[in-house]
Amino acid sequence: MATLKFPKWENNPCAEYVFGIDGCPNGWVVAAIQATGEINHCELCIIEEFSQIIPTPSPIQSHIGEPVIPAIMVDMPIGLLDYGRRPCDRMTRRHIGARASSVFPAPRRPMLAFKDYEAANAWGKQQGHEGGGGLSKQAFSIMPKIKEIDAVMTPQLQSMISEAHPELAFTRLNQGIPCAHNKRHKDGIAQRCALLKGHGLPDPKELHQTLKDTHKTYTHKSGAKKHSATLNDVIDAMALALTARAKRSAPYRRHPRPTRIVTRNLGLETVSISFVTLFTSPDIDFMIFTLQVFS
């Protein structure tokens, strides 16, 4: 099983690092950068199970002995509604403009029990528009990872692990302006790489090549051998690491306060640390709750 390349939890890396996580075909790609000060490197690794990133329950201390709350951002729905659509998804789409199609509604919790797309989609449609409607194929394709996070997430962990969206992160990094091109377009890749490098991170293409050299391929359902993480997976994880760093270093508010779901008592929220020019809050942080920090 893959292990973290950067310092392990017993060495209290949460005092020194923040983390961005994106799902990839055979696990999760994790980007770790320094929590404070100048960023002089970015560590990448692939973990097979999301539980590998969860901090130990013991208090985490910084080098000066003060408690440190880990900052971990993941591009995956955390906290699901039984009925209806998450407000945070709507708010995220509103703020990323032309990139709104990258945010698709999260499945409702009962949908996690379905084994095939047609049955899950039919159940959703039976709930009607107010109940949330049908399910997109994109949402169904990531349900195994949603279930993986849901199985280990607790209200206590939500103080450390938050849902965030890469396109919202890039909107912040681009001074409130959504990226001009889709992330798979060559110009979209170039813009996102430039934004990351402009905020102190290494070249994502070079880091991706290193990741390809150090992690094994997996067998796709088509039978083809593929690499564990795409360049876009790496780019997204790095962007979320910067969101985690901003959350750690800046005061922020949640607008509105997190919603609690009776079945799991998890808050719906998506996190975005925002510029004053993008939002009117003088404190510069905006959380999107869907179980992200747009709640």
Image (cartoon, rainbow, N blue to C red):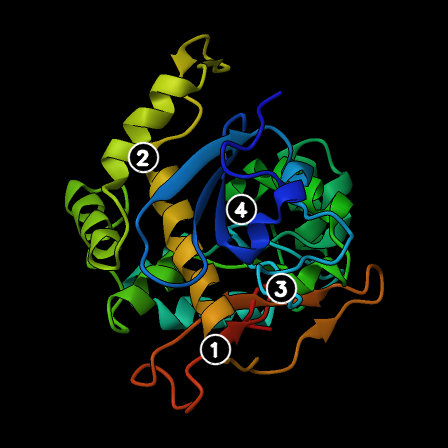
Q: Amino acid at mark 2?
A: Leu
User: In the rendered view of the protein, which quadrant contains the C terminus?
Assistant: bottom right
Label 1: which residue? 286
Where does residue 191 sit, x and y in percent of width and height? 18, 52
Cα separation between marks 2 and 4: 24 Å
Label 2: which residue? 231
Query: Viewer-proximal residue, 89 or 200?
Result: 200
Label annotation for residue 160: none
Q: Amino acid at mark 3?
A: Val
The mark lying in front, picked from 2 and 4, is 2
Where does residue 196 sit, x and y in percent of width and height? 26, 53
Which sits earlier in the primary sequence, circle 3 or circle 2?
3
179 on left or right of 28: left
Vertical arrangement, residue 64 with respect to residue 217, above or below:
below
Cα separation between marks 3 and 1: 21 Å
CB atoms at circles 3 and 1 under 8 Å apart?
A: no
What secondary structure is found at the residue carrying circle 1? strand
At label 1, counting other C-alpha atoms closer than 10 Å, the crowd grade (few under 14, some 14-19, many 20 or more) is many
Residue drawn 27% across the image and 40% down it: 204
Where does residue 59 sit, x and y in percent of width and height? 74, 58
At label 2, counting other C-alpha atoms closer than 10 Å, the crowd grade (few under 14, some 14-19, many 20 or more) is some
74 on left or right of 12: left
Name the residue at the front extreme.
64
Quadrant of the rendered image containing residue 103? bottom left
Which sits earlier in the primary sequence, circle 2 or circle 4?
4
The mark lying in front, picked from 3 and 1, is 3
Where does residue 66 sit, x and y in percent of width and height? 64, 68
CB atoms at circles 3 and 4 under 8 Å apart?
A: no
Label 4: which residue? 136
Cα separation between marks 3 and 2: 31 Å
